[in-house]
């Protein structure tokens, strides 16, 4: 039976990334306008997996998606992969062409896109579209649809070339992100183990909440990993949302949970009075691996 994958709309970076990840496997794509609906689709067993953009090389963690993963749901991470975020300026070329036949971006009054995509293109927007208002929407593909449905209003969008083609619009400017190494990290969450691809690289993600009355607890936590030579690829503090000044620590570990060293480290941390929640132990894929 085909698996159902929940994700953001067709033509979004999430859509392109998911299709790259699943390759030729036949699946049912369940597109949603809001990331909340993507999460809830899998929570309510409508889909087997959700595809979640969680981090970007330019903007860092996507706070809203991180909060959903931590505070709103309890679904394990089954895989992660990296995909390039190539953003373009999209609109109707005829609408912004001057009398001399040349493209005139000064005619653009408003640009729509996801807030992360807008943040990825700030230098371009400041230099080429200083007159244009920026309006955030739920996904890059939603912004493209708004442009499609409102001709003659001076609207443009930031999104993928796929979204432009799907909506019969033009790419007005290609690859407008501020940096060439613009990649997004995606998570696949759900209760079913991911078996479509294999990777020799595995990671484990955990949340650690420190005890209130233990000065130096974070140092002790990190020491439990350090003396075992366990590499941490990410550590980020986030508010617990329970009390001002209280935080949990999100940690990515470059090691599978079923090794000898990692469970012992987690036991040592729990013995300090810390609460440890395992978010998942999963295969990790680079873009190069997906392209092989």
Image: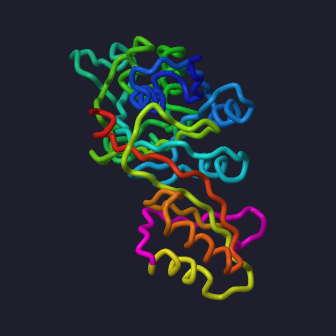
**Residue at point 57%, 66% (across, down):** 263
Residue farthest to the right?
Answer: 242
**Residue at point 38%, 43% (across, down):** 199
The quadrant in which residue 285 appears is top left
Position of the C terminus, as image quadrant, is top left
Viewer can see residue 84? yes
* Residue 132, image x, y percentages: 44, 36
* Residue 77, image x, y percentages: 57, 46
In the image, 146: left or right of 276?
left
The image shows residue 64, relative to residue 191, as above or below, that is below
Which residues are drawn in magenta?
A: 228-246
The image shows residue 211, relative to residue 285, as above or below, that is below
Viewer can see residue 111? no
The image shows residue 246, relative to residue 171, as above or below, that is below
The residue lying toward the viewer, choosing from 28 and 70, is 28
The quadrant in which residue 36 appears is top right
In the image, 27: left or right of 121?
right
**Residue at point 68%, 69% (across, down):** 209
The residue lying toward the viewer, choosing from 153 and 174, is 174
The residue lying toward the viewer, choosing from 137 and 57, is 57
The residue lying toward the viewer, choosing from 211 and 88, is 211
The quadrant in which residue 121 appears is top left
**Residue at point 45%, 60% (across, down):** 255
Tell me if residue 87 is in the magenta stretch: no
* Residue 166, image x, y percentages: 43, 14
């Amino acid at each position: 039976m085909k698996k159902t994958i929940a994700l953001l709309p067709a033509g979004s970076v999430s859509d392109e990334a998911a299709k790259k990840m699943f390759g030729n496997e036949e699946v049912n794509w369940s597109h949603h306008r809001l990331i909340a609906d993507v999460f809830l689709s899998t929570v309510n067993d409508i889909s087997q997996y959700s595809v979640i953009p969680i981090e970007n090389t330019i903007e860092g963690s996507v706070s809203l998606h991180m909060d959903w993963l931590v505070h709103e749901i309890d679904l394990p991470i089954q895989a992660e992969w990296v995909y390039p975020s190539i953003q373009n300026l999209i609109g109707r070329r005829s609408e912004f062409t001057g009398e001399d036949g040349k493209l005139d971006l000064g005619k653009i009054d408003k640009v729509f896109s996801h807030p992360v995509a807008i943040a990825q293109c700030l230098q371009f927007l400041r230099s080429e579209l200083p007159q244009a208002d920026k309006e955030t929407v739920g996904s890059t593909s939603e912004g493209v649809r708004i442009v499609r449905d409102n001709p003659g209003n001076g609207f443009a969008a930031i999104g993928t070339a796929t979204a432009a083609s799907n909506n019969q619009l033009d790419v007005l400017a290609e690859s407008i992100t501020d940096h060439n190494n613009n990649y997004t990290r995606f998570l696949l969450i759900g209760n079913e183990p991911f078996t479509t691809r294999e990777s020799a690289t595995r990671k484990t993600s955990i949340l650690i909440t420190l005890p209130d009355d233990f000065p130096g607890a974070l140092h002790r936590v990190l020491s439990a990993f350090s003396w075992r030579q366990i590499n941490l690829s990410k550590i980020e503090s986030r508010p617990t949302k329970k009390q001002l000044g209280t935080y949990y620590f999100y940690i990515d570990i470059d090691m599978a949970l079923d090794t000898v060293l990692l469970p012992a480290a987690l036991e040592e941390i729990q013995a300090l009075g810390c609460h440890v929640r395992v978010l998942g132990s999963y295969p990790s894929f680079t873009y190069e691996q997906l392209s092989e």
